[in-house]
Amino acid sequence: MDRSKIKPKHLIFATACLIVFLLTGSASVVIGFVFLFGTPMFFMNELPPYATIGERVWQYVYLTICTLIFVFLISPILIIIPLSFNAEPYFSFTEGMINFDPAAYSLRWYEDILTNGMQNPLATGAAWWSDMWENAQWILATRNSFFIAFVATVLATSLGTLAALGLSRPEMPYRSAITSLLISPMIVPLVITATGMFFFYSDIGLAKTYTGVILAHTTLGIPFVIITVTATLSGFDRSLIRASQNMGANGWTTFYKVIMPLILPGMISGALFAFITSMDEVVAVIFIADVEQRTIPRQMFSGIREQISPTILAVASILVAISIVLLTTIELLRRRSEKLRGLSQA
Amino acid sequence: MTDVAFKDQMNEAGELLTADGVPLKQKLAITTRRARMRALLLTAPLIIFLVVSFVIPIGQMLFRSVYNAAGSNVLPNFAVSIQDWDEQGLPTEQMFEDFVKDMQLARKNRITGKTVGNLATRVNYEIPGTRSLFTKSSRKLSKVTEGPYKEALIKIDKKWNDPGLWIALKRVTKDITPYFYLAALDYKYDEKGDIVAADELYQIYVSNFWKTLRLSATITFITILLAYPVSYLLSTLPLRTSNMLMILVLLPFWTSLLVRTTAWIAILQTEGMANDILVFIGIIGDDNRVQMIYNQTGTIIAMVHILLPFMILPLFSVMKTIPPSYMRAARSMGATPFTAFRRIYLPQTLPGLAAGTLLVFILAIGFYITPALVGGEDGLLISNLIAYHIQKSLNWSLGAALGTILLIIVLVLYWLYNKLVGIDKLSFG
């Protein structure tokens, strides 16, 4: 079929664009219009020749609705990135930003991430760097976040993988009851978990300590490790274990040489889930942690509540960049795991 | 034949034996039990960890909803003697004496949880407006050194002559109390100690539960409406295209909750993008911009955005497995597109729909952060009320009672999810 042929729908669309331009006289509106209503046309597949006009119109409407939903999903995340370069202390686009005036953009909020809380932001050289490392609020929060998330991830991944190995054994007793228990930290409302931990950790002296926060975040990360590792193990060929034992390998050798390489993708994506859960968690931190254990989300939470400034948008943009990296990693791992287990079509 | 072949491997009873002479059946039972124990041992460290860091803390919190020892901590002797009172007239002189002496001791006490203030707060929950009576009386009681204590107390304040107060005190000095559940369900004790509905002004908890359920249902319904067409599109497109579009679903899923909430504040505020666009198109004037945030609308929009991936992912994984030929077959047999959808396609997507609906609803009723940031006053959910009682009003027992009710609702839904969908079907991406 000749794809380049001009069809009636193209003419209708071009006329619509022209009308919009004549009505508003603004080029950016036409670009928006083309994006919003042209995308569905791009995805429309060839309907059979007997399809009625009603069906054609319905398909177009349906695809337009889908485009709008995708815009709804992604636009909040993309919008904050240009907003974080705002030269003014506002949360919205200024006149200059819309006209792409370079003076309307600045890096001042990114600078603020580094300097906010510093004792002497005007110092130079090594003094500036050590001052930033020791005193800048967001830097301290970042250090806390990474430290807590790292320890919690290691704990959650090791305990979770071990348990997932047990759960996936065919002879595991009370499997569904135990799985429900291990997944429940994800289901129980965070306020209830955090309240319970607040009371209990206060009693045993763990409230307002790093240990307390780490234990809480480990608990919240465990369900993700269990889910991803058991999913990887569900396609696991158990005869490999017997083969390995048959050849004289003991339990540990079997685990390190046979099981672990195969479930490693699942373990890593579980670990990444646990890591991001901890990096994003704020309710438990609000209840359990003290100022000393402030994390990035905690800092953002109070920032939004108390003195809203575009610095939060700058932090948010950096976090979006991190989640893009993590998403790519997870996707690559998933493909590798499918390939290892022979599930992939490729 | 076989009987003869294995004759030397059997015992007198005719059971098969293994090489070391143990009946095969018994040996198998031992091996199976060992294998089960090994599997259980692998999960043991995590189970122990969760019991300590998760189950015990929550259990302890639940206990707090029925246990409040403020009364008996402050009035240890009175707490014992008042229980013999028949609630007719006023308590006996002996009980008054215990009360006064306990109060005098408590006044000197500085240990947290055992001061007159703690008692006053506890009684004040049940009879609002009695706080000052306790602090005032405590001050004046220090001068009372000898009986009759009943007259001395009534001389300080006439309210001590009210049997209703003593009935409340008898109730308060019992450590196990159903009071906080009554309060959480908008009930209270009247002067005679009977359970009645709370004053209308104080009936806020049941309506808040209903509001939480209603908002969660609305949010779930909107996510279904938005997720269904998108999941269908993703499941019918060629793999390459659908993988690309899936990024648009997974990126929000991977982005921090606070980042997304912040983004919605930027978009929905009165000077934000959404209003700018509406003004530009001409739907509203520049001077009457719509308040879309710090109210229920803000909570709904932000939460729909945050929970949408949890609906799309299970729907998508179910829709992917439905062969498109079924719909074509229905159409070729004369079904209209709508009938074919209703009778053929929709029933096949029900498992995914059930999974997504339950998951989104369960997550929605426990939401705390987003309502706290964009909900303003009327967009708050029950979680926010619980946090308020734990952090601000410090009525921990009431917070625990509200939390228990919320937990029961969630656990019932979780059980239902397990029954209908199976917890092992849960997956991400």
Image (cartoon, helix red, strand yellow):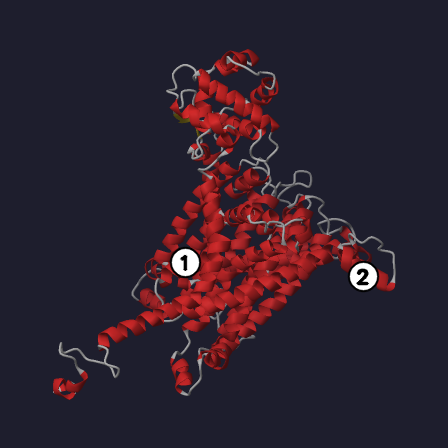
Type of amino acid at the residue the image marks with label 2: Ser
Q: Disc 1 versus disc 2: distance between alpha carbons?
A: 48 Å
Would you say A133 lies left or right of A37 here? right
Comparing B220 with B237, the one in front is B220
Residue A41 placed where, x, y %?
54, 65
The residue carrying mark 2 is A130
Quarter occupied by residue A125 = bottom right
Chain at numbered mark 2:
A
Is residue A282 visible from the viewing direction of this image? yes
Which subunit holds the residue at mark 1?
A: A
Which residue matches tag 1?
A: A180
Quarter that holds the N terminus of chain B: bottom left
- B321, above or below A280, in the image: below
Q: For residue B268, which numbered disc appears in the image?
A: none
Q: Quadrant of residue B391?
A: top right
- Residue B72 to residue B55: above or below: above
Left or right position of B255 against A225: right
Residue at image coords 61%, 54% = B260
Residue B200: x and y in percent read 47, 26
Q: Amino acid at mark 1?
A: Ser
Note whether A198 is above or below A157 in the view shown: above
